Structure formats: C-alpha cells, structure tokens
Amino acid sequence: MKKRIVVAITGASGAIYAKVLLDKLSQLQDQIDDIGVLMSQNAEDVWKYELRNEDYQNYPFTRYAKDDFTAPFASGSAKFKYMVICPCSMGTMSRIATGISNDLVTRAADVILKERRKLVLVARDTPYNLIHLRNMQTITEAGGIICPASPSFYSRPATFEDLASTVVDRILDLFDFDIQTFRWSEENVS
C-alpha cells in the first residue's frame, strides 16, 4: 500500500537531515501516494545558511503554507498515515505536547495523534532540559515517537550525507519503507 506522508521542516539546526530525507523520499516514489511538505520561514533561512542553497524549492512534492488549514492533512478524513517533523525545534515540540494547534504543522501533528497514526519528531537540540524531556514524555505517551538526530557510526559514514542517512533511514524504517540500508550484524562489521 502506498504511503501518504506529511513532512514538516522547522527552523532547528540540522537542515542536512531534511535534505537527505527529501532526497530519499524522491527515490521512493513507487512506494508513495502523496507527500505534503510544510516548511517554516526559519527552516528556509537555516537551510540557506547551513547548506548554502535553496534546493528545498526543487523537490517534486506539494508545498503548503503554514497557515493553509485547507491542506488535506489538516483533517483526519484525508487518511495521511504518517508525519515526520525533521528537524523538530523544541518550540514546535512544546506546542504539540501542550495541544496548541496554532499553525498547520501543529494542527497536522494533532490530527496524526488523535487518529492514532504515526508521528515522528526528529529532535535536534542538545542538551535537553527538564521541560524538553517532559514534552518528549507527553508526546510519547500520546503515541508519538521521538527519534533524536543522533547519528550512528557503525556503518562508517564517510560524508555528512552518509551520517545524516543513519538517522533518516531509521525514520524510513519507522514508516515501513522497503529500503536498502546498513543493518547491524547483516554486514561485515570487523
């Protein structure tokens, strides 16, 4: 069954994660029915600063404005089953945890949670304070998944994109995509 996914990109540092996620989703079109992309102005600014380009404009997905509550995934009836916020700022996480749906990102997250669908937040901050941890706990208890932007190294990543892929591939696994990726004990780790 093809997937309907909401991808939200907030202004947290870590635009490389969003780039690699969008790149990989572009290569998985045969497994995708629809992707809606939400990107804050801060996210665009961070992307331009960190990646030194505006390639976020070049992906083959429908983009929605943060205040476009006519977007299909603003309602559970649209049957978007998956949402990822990558990277997810602590401010966005806080609004989701407290039920504040003041823009399309937080409304879509609220819809995904209320419909008992899959919400993944790629937390990109360090260190965490107690408020962050409690918000993560609240979201987890509501059915969301906190997937920190904590790359692994056992696959011996050679580039920043390879390193970001170790996190992005976990997201794609959480969404049940059929992907080729490094898996522990399935390859020579010596």
Image (cartoon, rainbow, N blue to C red):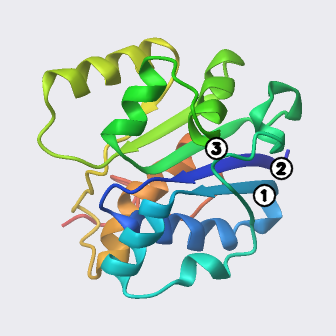
- Quadrant of the drawing holding the C terminus: bottom left
- Pinpoint residue 80: horizontal percent, then vertical percent: 78, 38
Question: Mark 2 and mark 3: span between their CA atoms?
Answer: 10 Å
Q: Earlier in the sequence, mark 1 or mark 3?
A: 1
Q: Who is closer to the viewer here, 190 or 76?
A: 76
Q: Report helix, strand or loop for mark 1.
A: helix
Q: CA distance from mark 1 to mark 3?
A: 10 Å
Is tag 2's residue or tag 3's residue first in the polypeptide sequence?
2
- Amino acid bearing label 1: Gln
Q: In the drawing, what numbered circle is on residue 61?
A: none
Indicate the secondary structure of the residue bearing disc 3: loop
Q: Please say if 103 is above or below 140.
A: below
* Badge 3 amino acid: Asp
* Residue assigned mark 3: 176
Q: At numbered mark 2, what does the secondary structure look like: helix, strand or loop? A: loop
**Amino acid carrying mark 2 in the image:** Lys
Q: Is label 2 in contact with label 1 (beta carbons under 8 Å)? A: yes
Q: Residue at x 37, y 28 (%)?
A: 94
For residue 147, side relative to residue 172 (left or right): left
Q: Neighbour class for label 3 at 10 Å: few (<14), some, many (≥20)?
A: few
Residue bearing the label numbered 1: 31
Does residue 173 lie above or below 42 as drawn? above
Callout 1 touching callout 3 (CB < 8 Å):
no
Residue of label 2: 2
25 or 80, nearer to the observer: 80
